[in-house]
Image: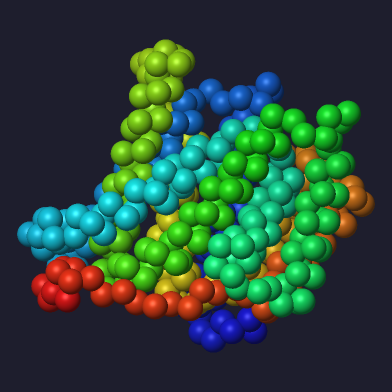
Amino acid sequence: MLGLVDCTSWLVFIAYVTLFVNNNLLIAFTKDKDNSYSYSTVLVVLLIELSKLTVATIFYCHKYSFHNLVADLQSNKTAFAYYLIPSVLYSIFNNLVFLNLANYNPTNYAILLQFSIVITGVIYQCLFKKDLSWQQWISLSILTLGCVISHMEEANEVFLELRDVFILIQVLCSSFAGVYNEYLLKNYSSQLDFWLQGIFMYANTSMCCVVLVTISGKLSPGVLTASSLKSVFEPVVILIVVNNVIAGLVTGLFLYKLNSILKKFALAIEMVALAILSRALLGTTVNFTKAVSILLVSVSVIVYSLNPLAIKSEVVVKPGLKLSNGDAR
């Protein structure tokens, strides 16, 4: 079923869905009555990225050695620099998760975030001159309709509010970062060890988060107070951090063990699970209109997954690219 042929594949698939559903629910659970957070979200994102960097470093050193790590970092400075652009985008994305979950309930947030598939399709069509099939256009049209229905239900007199701008920015960050990774990073650094690529990404995202924390501290001095630092280590916040770190590792296993098509199926399951659990745990209303939008988006995601877009991989081997096993290309 779904191409999940063994117990390990099923465990990875279920873990992937569970962890990302947990993440949205945990963040929504920590909201105050005025839709704000009692802790500094920028500090939490920084802690998450530093934790991912630590885990990736430990696994890499366990597989090879710390000496190998230092040598590979020195030999692959250009590859490290290539990760800066997606790291900036992912840093913005990760911080907007908290902001947008403060403005939307988990179900609406999950639905609207799927609009990134539409943006990705447009990017492929315009930038890479890759024509979409009629099945792909149908799936993107259905997805757009589902997102519009979900948005119209909550929209007041003003169709486009400030919160809608933030969700659009998050969608754009997700789309452009994903395409960049597929088209450039995977082709350039596919010879590098999986954990070394993780170190490159998480080191860059950590640096970006440090910049964001510094800017936030200047704009809002309360971000870096003793009380805000203490609030980051509350049990539920630590649970968010741990959940995100494990989710990052499982995502890597997901793409390694399974494929991007199953990832789209997982997104559809996440939306349904979030709708049910949000209703049960957070009291979020799921009316007929919301159910229709969930159905439309889920169907579109499944149709799209059966006719996925892909850029032909052309592995570019750079002279002097240092491999983790000590070889050089």
Quarter-wise, where is residue 200 in the image? bottom left
Please tell me in which quadrant of the rendered image residue 223 appears: top left
Q: Quadrant of residue 161?
A: top right
- Residue found 13% across the figure and 60% down from its top: 75
Question: Against 259, is 267 above or below?
Answer: above
- Residue 36 position in % (x across, y down): 61, 24
| In-image side of 13 versus 59 (left or right) | right
Residue found at the far left of this picture: 67
Q: Is residue 83 left or right of residue 22?
A: left
Image coordinates of residue 319 in percent, x first then y, are 18, 71
Residue 136 visible? The answer is yes
Quarter in which the C terminus is drawn: bottom left
Residue at far right of view: 288
Residue shown at 66% from the left, 26% from the top:
35
Location of the N terminus (image quadrant): bottom right
Q: Residue at x 88, y 28 (%)?
A: 157
Q: Position of residue 221 (x, y in %)?
A: 42, 13
Vertical arrangement, residue 115 with respect to residue 257, above or below: above
Q: Residue at x 46, y 71 (%)?
A: 255
Indicate the position of residue 149 as horizontal and vertical percent values.
Answer: 85, 49
Q: Nearer the viewer, residue 277 or 52?
A: 52
Is residue 53 among what the camera can see? no
